[in-house]
Image (tube, rainbow, N blue to C red):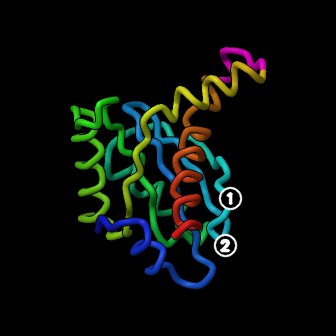
């Protein structure tokens, strides 16, 4: 079920974490919060395949890391409108709800990949290394934004 962030936080059990997702066409970047919901850390990048297999992989990771909810990046256009990628992300969220039932919240991910890429360029990472890291770092950027908002509320 799709919730707002404070409601998602309220539904978490003791010592449960949030899993951040940067949903791409070919990959899903993943990041994990700590149990105090303060710090987001890059976890891994999943290569996308069939939806059912993607969800099974996510379920296994969620069980392994005591995840109680998901924060899914919502790729709005720069003017705030919803384009085809937003529709695909909302469809993915509906599938999560139907096939898994894990509660989730959306987070505006505009410029997350650009910000992470800029940071890696400033850190002088090679193009190959940036390609390897960008999705999970973008997921951490998305999740950290949500965690920072939760700390203020």
Question: Where residue 127 is drawn, which disc sits there?
Answer: none
**Classed neighbour count for the residue bearing mark 2: other residues with Cα under 10 Å, few (<14), some (14–19), many (≥20):** few
Task: Give the CA distance from mark 1 to mark 2.
Answer: 8 Å
State the extent of the magenta-drawn residues as a range: 124-130
At 51% across and 57% down in the image, what residue appears? Answer: 146
Query: Is residue 146 positioned above or below 84 on the image?
Result: below
For the image, the number of numbered tags is 2
Q: Position of residue 49 (x, y in %)?
A: 38, 39
Q: Quick one: 37 or 94, which is closer to the camera? A: 37
Residue position marked by numbered label 1 in the rendering:
39
Left or right relative to 6: residue 35: right
Pointer 1 and pointer 2: residues touching (CB < 8 Å)?
Answer: yes
Q: Position of residue 145 (x, y in %)?
A: 54, 51
Q: Position of residue 142 (x, y in %)?
A: 52, 47
Q: Which quadrant of the figure contains the N terminus?
A: bottom left
At 45% across and 57% down in the image, what residue appears? Answer: 71
């Amino acid at each position: 079920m799709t919730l707002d962030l404070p409601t998602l936080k309220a539904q978490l059990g003791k010592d449960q974490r949030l899993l951040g997702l940067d949903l791409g066409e070919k990959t899903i970047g993943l990041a994990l919060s700590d149990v105090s919901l303060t710090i987001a850390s890059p976890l891994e990048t999943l290569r996308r395949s069939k939806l059912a297999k993607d969800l099974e992989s996510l379920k296994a990771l969620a069980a392994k890391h005591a995840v109680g909810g998901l924060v899914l990046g919502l790729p709005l256009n720069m003017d705030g409108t919803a384009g085809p990628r937003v529709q695909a992300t909302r469809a993915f969220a509906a599938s999560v709800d139907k096939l898994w039932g894990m509660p989730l919240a959306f987070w505006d991910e505009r410029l997350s990949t650009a910000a992470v890429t800029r940071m890696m360029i400033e850190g002088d990472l090679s193009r190959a290394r940036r390609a390897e890291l960008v999705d999970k770092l973008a997921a951490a950027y998305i999740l950290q934004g949500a965690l920072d908002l939760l700390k203020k509320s």
